[in-house]
Amino acid sequence: MKKILDTTIVAVEWLNTKNVLLTLTASQQMPDMLPGQFVEVRVDNEPDVFLRRPISIHFFDPQKNLLYLMVQVVGKGTKRMAALKVGDVLNLILPLGNTFSVPENPQRLLLVGGGVGVAPLLYLGAELKKKGHVVTFLLGARTAADLLRMEAFLAYGEVYVTTEDASMGEKGFVTQHSLLQQQNFDFIYTCGPTPMMQAVARYAKEKGIPCEASLENTMACGLGACLCCVTDTQHGHKCVCSDGPVFNINELKW
Amino acid sequence: MVDLEVKIGGLTLKNPVMTASGTFGYGTEYADFIDLARLGGIIVKGTTLHHREGNPYPRMAETPSGMLNAVGLQNKGVDYFIEHIYPEIKSLNTNVLVNVSGSCIEDYVTTAEKINALEKVPAIELNISCPNVKQGGMAFGTSAKGAAEVVAAVRKAYHKTLIVKLSPNVTDIAEIAKAVEAEGADSVSLINTLLGMAINAEKRRPVLSTVTGGLSGACVKPIALRMVWQVSRAVKIPVVGLGGIMNATDAIEFMLAGATAVQIGTANFIDPAVTVKVVEGIEEYLQRHGMTDVNQLIGALEI
């Protein structure tokens, strides 16, 4: 069940100059959340920030009742979020959207993320590992400084890295990593910039590997009511917020 | 206790708060947040005779204290609504109204006829004011003659409460309101969105795929309020006010200006529970001012 919930910031950690990790808790137990789902954050204290901001769930710890959000500062709304301090209250609607498919039998799964698109892959990797799957992360960034929370990903599987300037891992884009020539995977999950996800989708299609991508479109309601965030699919326009954000690549017109 | 009941033609609302079409889906999207039975009515997504895919993404742009949308009446058509959605919502303990749109008079009439047969839909809101479709929509709503023609045709085919949703993108909205009143409309609702535009200067591109779109949200409230005031003085039929209502005070202002009922739209995106808060806020206002009946508020503006 979706809830409107006041949460309190318990930690603010700057990951680099433009990405911040927020840790939030609430006085009541937060509802169950699934990997791939997101929250709508209320930041409307000024005229030019009117709507909520959709932010993917980076990690959720139900025992400690802690929710982790990774926020990249791109505009006024995210700038406001990044300026939050410990003790500040943040109003959220959660959890929203669908989730990734989880194979029934233990399999080798590849999670490919780029930039702040790595955010939902941590919780996904953790849940997949818990279900007995072998998880491998392939993370891309412009430079080593842009690579977000690599140490956290290492807790759930092997981590391979590409950077565009060769400051860490292999040089180039994620789809150029030698890992893809050396190992076979049963399922691929991807989240990041659209061109990156499209390249991953092409690779998956060539190899005949099932693949799901998590999309990010600008949204208003986040509930499937306003129909603003649609993506074009084989079955017409679908809402990224309520039919997604996770789509099978075969459904997308990529 | 205060009496919150109002009447729109033959339609009785348990309170004056409804949801604006296109902002509340089919109601069920909000059922986790509020008890839908506490609303005066739910006006569901704009429905057309045939399936419509709507406009390409991007369809939304945030603007100061508001937003532009260019959804373009995406819906699966009236037959799909009747077969798949109506059975899910007909037992809701509130008035379910259907917003009807079309690209020609025949489409409006056929759609209205089909909705007329639905026992649990007591009224339609005729949308002659959508700024986001090339044909029909606002084309009918921006001239008194066009508005009168479509309302006259629908009135013959539709026998329950007929509310006509007016466009603010006109020189004299009161003239249009009088024209649809003369053709038998039971009520007018206003305003639909204002035609607007947003540009991304860095990219030198429009933000919306359609270049222009409909503006809504807090920023349109002064215009909406002025138009509700003008129209309510020009017609005898009840006026339903909407446009930038974010809280109970806003809703009360619309009623003071002459609205019999109000619709909450864009505010639902920011607070999915806002509608019930508006109902409670109106009740609290009435008690605080020693009023016993919400009808005492209608047009009670002192000038």
Image (spheres, coloured by chain):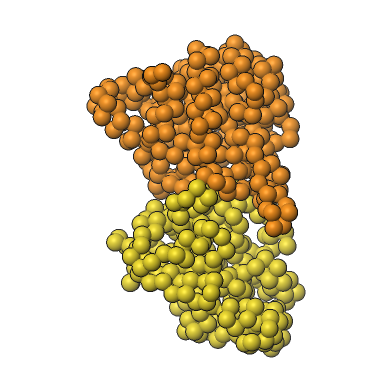
Chain colours: A yellow, B orange
Horizontal and vertical percent position of residue B301: 40, 20
B96 lies above or below B54 = above
Horizontal and vertical percent position of residue A184: 66, 83
Horizontal and vertical percent position of residue B232: 49, 18
Of residues A145 and B91, the one drawn nearer to the viewer in this rendering: A145
Residue at 40% in and 38% down: B247
Image side of residue A246 versus residue A234, left or right: left
B205 lies above or below B246 = below
Image side of residue B303 versus residue A193, left or right: left
Residue at 58% in and 32% down: B192
The N terminus of chain B - image quarter: top left
The C terminus of chain B - image quarter: top left
Would you say residue B216 is visible in this rendering?
Answer: yes
Horizontal and vertical percent position of residue B42: 47, 34
B229 lies above or below B28 = above
Residue at 49% in and 21% down: B229
Image side of residue B108 versus residue B285, left or right: right
